[in-house]
Image (cartoon, helix red, strand yellow):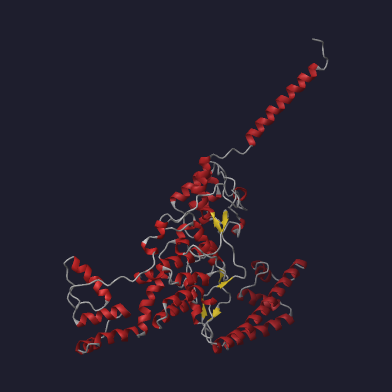
Amino acid sequence: MPFNHHRPYNLIAIGVSAFLALILGTVRAQTAKPAITPEQTEFFETRVRPVLFKSCFTCHGPEQQLGNLRLDSESAMKKGNAHGPGVIPGDPDKSLLVQAIRYTGKIKMPPSGKLTLAEIDALTQWVKTGATWPESTGSKPAVTAKELVITEEQRRFWSFRPIKKPAVPAVKDASWAVSPIDRFILAKLERKNLRPAAKTDRRSLIRRAYYDLIGLPPTIAEIEEFVADKSPNAFAGVVDRLLASPQYGERWGRLWLDVARYADTRGYVFTEDRVYHNAYTYRDYVIRAFNDDLPFNRFIVEQLAADKLNLGDDRRPLAGLGFLTVGRRFLNNPHDIADDRIDVTARGFLGLTVNCARCHDHKFDPIPTKDYYSLYGVFASSTEPNPPLSISPKEITEPYEKQNKELFEKEKQAKEIVRVQVRGLRDKIKNNPEALSKDFKAVLQRIRVNALPSDSELATLAPVFEPAARDTLKSVQDSIANLKKTMPRTPEFAMAVQDIPNPITPHVFLRGNPNNRGDEIPRRFLAVLSGPDRKPFTNGSGRLDLADDIASNDNPLTARVIVNR
């Protein structure tokens, strides 16, 4: 082989290249993100993400980041906030997230109450094994789940069948039966060779009627009067009198208020006012509905969509919308609020646990997840008006609204005067630190930028306002005090809802996660209770369409449910 004087150089070059490749490869191998195993993905999706979604994302997710902390992505979790990273992979004891959920540090999360031991263990184990976070699948699922198909057998289940009037059975002792219902009872007794209990005495009978219909005992005089009345219509007269009494609506309305999960507080909402100041108008609406013998189909429609009805001058039915709004507020998580409204509507009127289909097709009833999100779109397209809607007559509402508007404008004017003066004082100190005393400067430092001072702080600062502004503020404050003193009678307000201007088209939230969206679906009624030509809701949010479908004579569940109640 001829000698090549370049060969030694080429060998050295090749050796150096190989050496560099080896070194760089080792470095890359050490710094590359390790692959996530299927087991880690399953653990995260089944044990970790549901806890984060349920307890963390509301306050530390895409919509708000309290404490400047976001926890809905790997980068945000590791970035943390001013206190440090949210998690330190491999070291749960030093991870702020784990310290917070264990309630061992200064920060204790979630503030509504400590997680379960299983949830704490899951998050701790996840951090300990590296805090792996699988890549998002985007708006569509990587694998489309098999869609639930409602079978004919499910549609033929007894409660979904149309209601039919049965034949009244023949009985041996026809004289015992007063109504057709008695014949069904007696026929069953006779088949078992049993006889009905003997008729009760008149004292017991009137007590039963009173407790059943108004929840109160009769007086001694009422008992004696009934015992002495031997006319054939004596008991019917007692029943009619009790049905006409205002206590009837209070007694039986309370049972419906239980169905409607009535409360005058909104549950845990952090720093907000927890009291529903207008909840009593829904309570009064229910009592009035029972006392006025409001037809049940109208009762349904008013509680779901009274704002969509032509009410005329009597706006009291708007208070029926409290059926949707008196529930818990779940730290103002809109998805949980909509879920609560789906639940009270479906269980209250239909006896179905539709909200079981929030994360998956219903395990027992023929309710696919898509049906849940069809209803989700209805309630997510509704909002509560602010200020609330008045339900009092015009002669009460109009003077109040006129003076309240004037009061609002005066209060707005006073706030702006104070805000401008406080801003001027800050600039004054900035340009001349000795312009104000320490006391004034201390008060200014306590007031957040663009915030308004408290009454005590304002009393301290007002003397150093500009003279003209101080005089104007005093005049406006006097007007405010006079308006409040002479305020007309306050009208009653409904805890109502209204449609948003542009109703949403819902998507399925895969596994109930709003950050992982699946198929787009229309707003419409449940498939198992609809015919083959199920149509999307087109009237705004669809609440009126939904109410009509629930109250329809073609819907066999509604009547069965209220009769059983």
Residue 205 position by quadrant: bottom left
Using residue 371 as the reference point, say whether residue 169 is left or right of it: left
How far across and down, in percent of the image, does residue 38 sit? Answer: 53, 40
How far across and down, in percent of the image, does residue 194 sit? Answer: 17, 68
Residue 161 position by quadrant: bottom left
Residue lying at the far top in this picture: please name it.
1
The quadrant of the rendering that contains the C terminus is: bottom left
| Residue 156 in sight here | yes
The quadrant of the rendering that contains the N terminus is: top right
Quick one: 216 or 64, which is closer to the camera?
Answer: 216
Vertical placement of residue 491 versus 7, above or below: below
Quick one: 483 or 145, which is closer to the camera?
Answer: 145
| Residue 104 in sight here | no
Residue lying at the far right in this picture: please name it.
5
Q: Residue at x 35, y 81 (%)?
A: 248
Q: Residue at x 19, y 66 (%)?
A: 191
How far across and down, in percent of the image, does residue 262 sit? Answer: 43, 72
Residue 465 position by quadrant: bottom right
How far across and down, in percent of the image, does residue 209 sit? Answer: 27, 80
Q: Residue at x 64, y 67 (%)?
A: 446
Quick one: 284 or 238, which is closer to the camera?
Answer: 238
Vertical placement of residue 34 versus 509, above or below: above
Vertical placement of residue 253 versus 50, above or below: below
